[in-house]
Amino acid sequence: KMGRVFFNTRENLDTTSCTGTDTYTMLASDSGKTFLVSGGAQAITLLPAADLIEGWRCRFITTASPSGDKTIGAGSAIISGSCQDAGGGQAAGTDGTPVTNVIIEAASQAGNWLEIVCDGSAYYFNASASQDTAFTTS
């Protein structure tokens, strides 16, 4: 007789860390998680350069337009990537020059997403937005 196997899918969904204004510092154990994003301006700190983990990844999904920008920072210019916006253009992109921050702007709307992946020495992002300037870099 075969039994059912249940997976705790909720353990990979974070519904609170990126909905307020308190700084959130990513952990090694956050790899594979999806963070639901809303609320006020917030600093979200990625793993520091000394602690990068090859294969570490996470995803951010905007569930409601934030009332302030969510700044996802690496502490140094080690993030590269791009965002496709609704107009078919590149809303946020590093064009081969790494940046320190990717920002989920207050203009972001429900359903926009940002994925970040680490290769052990740098971060790479890919994002999609339903409007212009939902994501920027600095």
Image: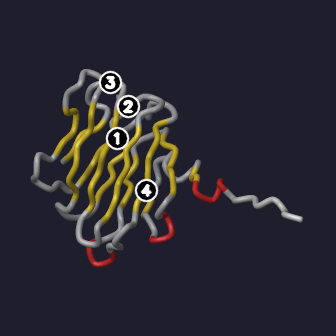
Q: Which kind of residue does numbered mark 1 sit on?
A: Ile
The residue singled out by tag 3 in the image is 131
| Amino acid identity at mark 3 | Gln
Q: Which residue is mark 1?
A: 104
Find the distance from the CA under tag 1 to the CA under tag 4: 14 Å
First-in-chain label (2 vs 4) = 4
Looking at the image, which is closer to me, 47 or 39?
Answer: 47
Q: Which mark is residue 108?
A: 2
Crowding near pointer 4: few (<14 within 10 Å), some, many (20+)?
some
What's under tag 4, amino acid-wise?
Answer: Cys
Going from N to C along the chain, the mark reached first, 1 or 4, is 4
User: Quick one: label 1 or label 3, which is nearer the N terminus?
Assistant: 1
Horizontal side of 58 relative to 6 (left or right) equals left
Q: Are marks 3 and 2 in contact (CB under 8 Å)?
A: yes
Crowding at dot 1, Cα within 10 Å, few <14 / some 14-19 / many 20+, comes out as many
Judged from the image, the secondary structure of the residue bearing numbered disc 1 is strand
Contact flag, marks 2 and 1 (Cβ < 8 Å): yes
Above/below status of 101 relative to 1: above
Residue at 17 percent across and 54 percent down: it is 99
Residue bearing mark 4 = 58
